[in-house]
Structure formats: C-alpha cells, structure tokens
Amino acid sequence: MKIGIIGCGAMGSVYASFFSSHDFNVSVIDKWKEHTHKISSTGLKITGPKLNKVLKTIKVVKNVKSLKNENLIIIATKIESLDSVCNQLKQIRNSKTQFVFIQNGIGSIPIIKKYFSNFFIGIAEGFGASIIKPGHVHHNSMRQIRIGHLKKNKTKEISTIVKLWEKAGFNANKYEDINQLIWEKFLCNVFLSAPCTAFECTIGDLLNSKQKLSIAKGCLMEAYRLGLKNNINFTFKNPISYGLKFAKLMPKAKPSMYLDFLNRKKSEIDYINGAVVTLSKKKGLSAPYNETLAEIIKTKEKDFA
C-alpha cells in the first residue's frame, strides 16, 4: 500500500512515521530542505509515548507528479499553500488514489472544491507534535483521527480510509457531519492557538493562569456563538467544558501557531482567530477577544518570513 504525504512538518512527520512503521510504503514532499535531507540520509526519528523509532524507508520525492501511483495521499500543508497544492494534484487525479485533507482553521473546503468533487477531510484531535530538529519529530499525545466526507452517501468509503489509519496504529473514527467535525476542531484551535502564542506559553501554563485562561475562554465563546449563527449542530452544550477537556489531554504541548512563532514563521492566524473576526462581522457579531489577539499575533509576526 502506497501512501503519499504532502507537508512533512510536525504533524505530517508523525503521519509518515506511523504509516512507515506499520509497513506502508511512504513518500513525502516538503519544501524544508534540511528536514527532508535528514529523512533521506539518516531516516526520520520519532519519539513519544506511542512510538520511538528511526524510520529509514521513507522516500522523499521532489514533486507531486511522483505521487501519481499512490493509493492514499494525505495533504497536511497550511491553508495558505492549499490552492497551489490542489492545482498540482489535479494533474494526477485517478480512480485509484484517494485524498485526505488535514488543515487547521476554516476556509479550506472552498479552496479544495475548486479542484475536487470527491475528497475526504481529516481532523487530528488531541495531538501534540513538534519538530525537535531537522529529521526528528516528537509527539506528546494522540487522541484520534476523525475522517469525513462532504457527501452523505460515503459511509463505506469513509470506513475504508479509517481502516488504513487504524492499520497504521492510529485511533481513527468515521464522521458523518463534516461541518460539525470542522467547527468542533476549529473551536479548540481558537481556544488555544492565539492565546498560547500571545502569552508565549504551553497549553498547561495557559490552563494554570486564571487571567490567561479567561481570555482564552472569551475567544472560544466568540467562536461558539459564530458557529451557532452558522447553524452548526455541536455535539455539546457547554463549549468551555469541551475546550478544557481537549486542552487537558496535552498540557506540555505548544499549539502549531506558537511553534511557528518560535521558528519565526508566519502563522495561520487569519484562518483561525482572525477568521472568527472576519466571519463574525458578516453575521453582525462582535469578536473583541479574537480581534485583539489576532492583532497582537500579527504585530509579533510582522518581521517574519
């Protein structure tokens, strides 16, 4: 079984490691040359509670065309790169290859739909992963991968994709309401991403500070009200309890936005906390907590590449 992974950052490296360690043939693409060079020369090292190993069979490829014979392609890039990636992927579409898109924030689906009518959405829930150095990824926790599809009659196909993830050692589950799936993860991103980055702290540090946590809760409630305004049928009535339960799974972790900040990289603030502000205005809602933190993050990033 051949697996292609586009975007071999922290999460993409975790996916690659687990699939490779369970005897899948894995190929990866990433523009970070130091990282991919290490993977090619000495293997990809993964450490953490579920897997400690050096994977030496992961293949690094230079372009999307090299993935034309894969059974499954996982797209784990940031949303800002998604349009370009999809434009390249459309050239290798075929009946054999399935595509799973895993992005943070909201806004990815309209981009994907410009190029694809049949694709799967994945949500990584309760994961904490970071690149220690080129060629070395660490995972703190792994709760589950949830897989869904935009169309209602894809239960069998979703189950097939879920089984592949299970064979690679993941706790994977199918999900029928894709909008609910996206928004529930989005709330967790909003709750943790900008607050941890603005205060430069781990998730545990955020939870242990009454003042910091109060601001994070404000961000979460603004996103929740926005979801209700968009007719999202959340599986919970208490978003604060939901967010806290999620956060407590990985107290030592740093959200990907904070990791970007530490590496002086532009984050996805416009698609997470910034998106709450933009979409709230369209619905006649205010989002002062998210607006303030989004501005703080943008100020911090103004000199980043």
Image (spheres, grey):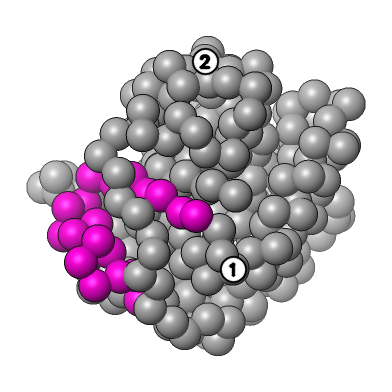
Tag 2 secondary structure? loop
Point 64% across, 45% down: residue = 122
Quadrant of residue 119 within the rendered picture:
top right
- Taking 155 as reference, is 159 above or below it? below
Q: Position of residue 179 (x, y in %)?
A: 73, 35
Point 53% across, 71% down: residue = 21
147 left or right of 55?
A: right
Residue closest to the far top: 114
* Total number of numbered discs in the rendering: 2
- Taking 243 as reference, is 100 above or below it? above
Judging depth in this view, the residue of 23 and 11 nearest the camera is 23
Point 62% across, 33% down: residue = 98
The amino acid at mark 2 is Tyr
Q: Is residue 195 visible?
A: no
Q: Is residue 148 magenta?
A: no
Tag 1 secondary structure? loop
| Circle nearer the N terminus (1, 2) | 1
Magenta-highlighted residues: 25-45
Q: Position of residue 78 (x, y in %)?
A: 40, 41
Point 75% across, 51% down: residue = 162
Quadrant of residue 160 within the rendered picture:
top right
The amino acid at mark 1 is His
Density class for disc 1 (Cα within 10 Å; few <14, some 14-19, many ≥20) is few
The C terminus sits in image quarter: top left
Looking at the rendered image, the disc whose residue lies closer to the viewer, 1 or 2, is 1
- The residue to which callout 2 is attached is 115
- Taking 275 as reference, is 161 above or below it? below
Density class for disc 2 (Cα within 10 Å; few <14, some 14-19, many ≥20) is some
- The residue to which callout 1 is attached is 22
- Taking 294 as reference, is 264 above or below it? below
Q: Position of residue 210 (x, y in %)?
A: 54, 79
